[in-house]
């Protein structure tokens, strides 16, 4: 991973840690803005992945959210990216909860959980940038080693 | 109780004979307590796990198909696999054999060479332990049998990745009311709620735990697991219920590693759903293998009148 990507992900993680650590009253006072910010941070995480793979991040939206469009873009020809599909959808869900009901008694908790979900996305993408195969070994397993195995077989033969 | 799945073929897979031994024990004990019968596959083999699949997915299809063939030979039309990896692989084999002529050709060739019957798609249905209990006993049936309610437990249900992904190998899911959801699974939630537990709304129930990279990139796995644990605690959970031996051992070992490496202590307990249901039915903690878990939950359970 290059330093730039590292720095950007580190900055995002630091911001998420700061949101999670805020007192309830501070979270509630700025709830809708913070919820939108989490969504933007989620988009920024996916942009880092797309940029690292030479793709221009889309400006389109899916179901009204650019985050979901960016996920779809990342998942094209890369099924392992579906390992963060539900994480993206949970982020949208938590953003909606806060924006639609900012005065709800659970708003601070919902924001913190939204930030934790965003952090999972950052960790997953950060992990994938570190080890490209992350997510390609379990639910999206594909023959990553087929070429190496074929070469070994040929050598043996 | 529907009568369906009263007796099914049982494919424990290798994890349940090793690190997931407590899952094997608790699944069998739970079945016994519920009057359900499991017939372990004779001479079963590895499902191809992830290692074979990452080299030759068609060989993995054959390995899983051989197990399905054994189930058929034993006279079963249903095989239950509690491990998410095994469950996923048998489902994948079923899908590949139904849809991919090359996979069928490899399966035919290797089955002939090995000298056993070639498995044909559609003969045996693979189910998970969650499907087994949900269908054979159901929530009402469980409620009627509960002796020790799980009412003092707040549970985050963690399904992991292989129970629902990729969606196309699980054609029975996402079929509306009564069926399992691939985006927000709920069968484990339903069963534990029936046993009295309070489920928390856990937003990371299918999120990646980095399990397969636990050796090649341990820090990534630990950070992902730590986030799963802290999020469960933030949801108010005091227990994470699991239904996969790989997830379970990953959560347990990285809970320890998170404290050692990152100085982050979490106290949420990690228990198989079969252990929780077993204790709800009055089985002792020992009977369902709580002592075989890597983490210590006995005192926590005793304080709540369980085990």
Image (tube, grey):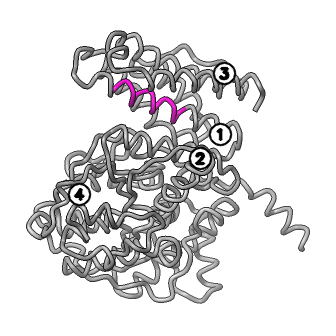
- Asked if B6 appears above or below B165 in the picture, the reply is below
The chain to which mark 4 is attached is: B
Q: Are marks 4 and 1 in contact (CB under 8 Å)?
A: no
Judged by its main secondary structure, the magenta piece is helix
The chain to which mark 3 is attached is: A
Q: How far across and how far down the image is residue A70, in percent?
A: 54, 24
Q: How far across and how far down the image is residue B86, in percent?
A: 48, 67
Local packing at callout 3 (Cα closer than 10 Å; few below 14, some 14-19, many 20+) is some
Q: Do marks 3 and 2 share a chain?
A: yes
Q: How far across and how far down the image is residue B116, in percent?
A: 55, 87
Considering the image in quadrants, where does the C terminus of chain B appear? bottom left
Front residue of A112/B123: it is A112
**Mark linked to residue B192:** 4
Q: Are marks 3 and 1 in contact (CB under 8 Å)?
A: no
> Residue at 23% of width from left, 79% of height from top?
B36
Residue topped by disc 2: A135
* Mark 3 or 2, closer to the camera: 3
> Residue at 21% of width from left, 65% of height from top?
B135
Spatial CA span between label 1 and label 2: 8 Å
Q: Are marks 1 and 2 in contact (CB under 8 Å)?
A: yes
Q: How far across and how far down the image is residue A24, in percent?
A: 33, 20
Looking at the rendering, the stretch of residues picked out in magenta corresponds to A110-121
**Mark linked to residue A128:** 1
Residue topped by disc 3: A8
Front residue of B242/B130: it is B242
Spatial CA span between label 3 and label 2: 22 Å
* Mark 4 or 2, closer to the camera: 4
Secondary structure under the numbered disc 2 in the rendered image: loop
């Amino acid at each position: 991973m290059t330093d730039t990507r590292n720095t950007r992900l580190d900055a995002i993680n630091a911001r998420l840690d700061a949101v999670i650590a805020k007192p309830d009253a501070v979270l509630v006072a700025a709830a809708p803005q913070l919820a939108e910010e989490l969504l933007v941070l989620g988009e920024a995480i996916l942009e880092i992945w797309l940029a690292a793979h030479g793709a221009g991040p889309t400006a389109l939206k899916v179901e009204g959210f650019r985050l979901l469009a960016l996920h779809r873009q990342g998942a094209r020809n890369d099924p392992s990216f579906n390992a963060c599909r539900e994480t993206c959808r949970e982020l949208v869900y938590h953003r909606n909860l806060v924006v639609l009901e900012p005065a709800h008694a659970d708003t601070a908790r919902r924001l913190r959980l939204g930030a934790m979900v965003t952090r999972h996305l950052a960790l997953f993408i950060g992990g994938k940038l570190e080890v490209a195969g992350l997510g390609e070994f379990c639910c999206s397993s594909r023959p990553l080693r087929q070429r190496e195995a074929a070469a070994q077989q040929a050598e043996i033969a | 109780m529907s009568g369906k799945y009263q007796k099914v073929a049982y494919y424990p897979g290798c994890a349940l004979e090793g690190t997931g031994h407590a899952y094997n024990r608790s699944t069998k004990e739970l079945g016994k307590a519920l009057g359900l019968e499991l017939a372990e596959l004779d001479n079963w083999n590895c499902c191809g796990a992830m290692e074979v699949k990452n080299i030759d997915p068609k060989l993995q299809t054959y390995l899983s198909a051989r197990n399905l063939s054994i189930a058929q030979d034993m006279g079963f039309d249903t095989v239950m696999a509690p491990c998410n990896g095994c469950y996923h692989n048998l489902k994948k084999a079923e899908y590949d054999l139904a849809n991919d002529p090359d996979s069928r050709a490899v399966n035919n060739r290797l089955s002939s060479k090995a000298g056993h019957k070639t498995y044909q798609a559609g003969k045996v249905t693979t189910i998970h332990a969650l499907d087994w209990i949900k269908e054979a006993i159901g929530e009402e049936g469980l409620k009627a049998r509960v002796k020790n309610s799980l009412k003092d437990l707040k549970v985050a249900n963690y399904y992991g990745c292989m129970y629902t992904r990729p969606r196309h190998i699980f054609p029975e899911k996402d079929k509306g009311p009564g069926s399992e959801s691939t985006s927000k699974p709920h069968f484990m939630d339903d069963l534990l709620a029936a046993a009295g537990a309070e489920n928390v709304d856990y937003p990371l129930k299918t999120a990646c735990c980095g399990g397969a990279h636990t050796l090649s990139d341990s820090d990534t796995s630990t950070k992902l697991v730590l986030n799963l644990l802290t999020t469960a605690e933030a949801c108010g959970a005091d227990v994470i219920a699991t239904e996969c031996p790989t997830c379970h051992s990953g959560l347990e070992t990285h809970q320890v590693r998170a404290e050692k490496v990152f100085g982050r202590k979490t106290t949420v307990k990690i228990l198989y759903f079969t252990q929780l249901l077993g204790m709800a039915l009055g089985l002792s903690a020992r009977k369902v293998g709580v002592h075989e878990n890597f983490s210590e939950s006995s005192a926590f359970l005793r304080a709540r009148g369980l085990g």
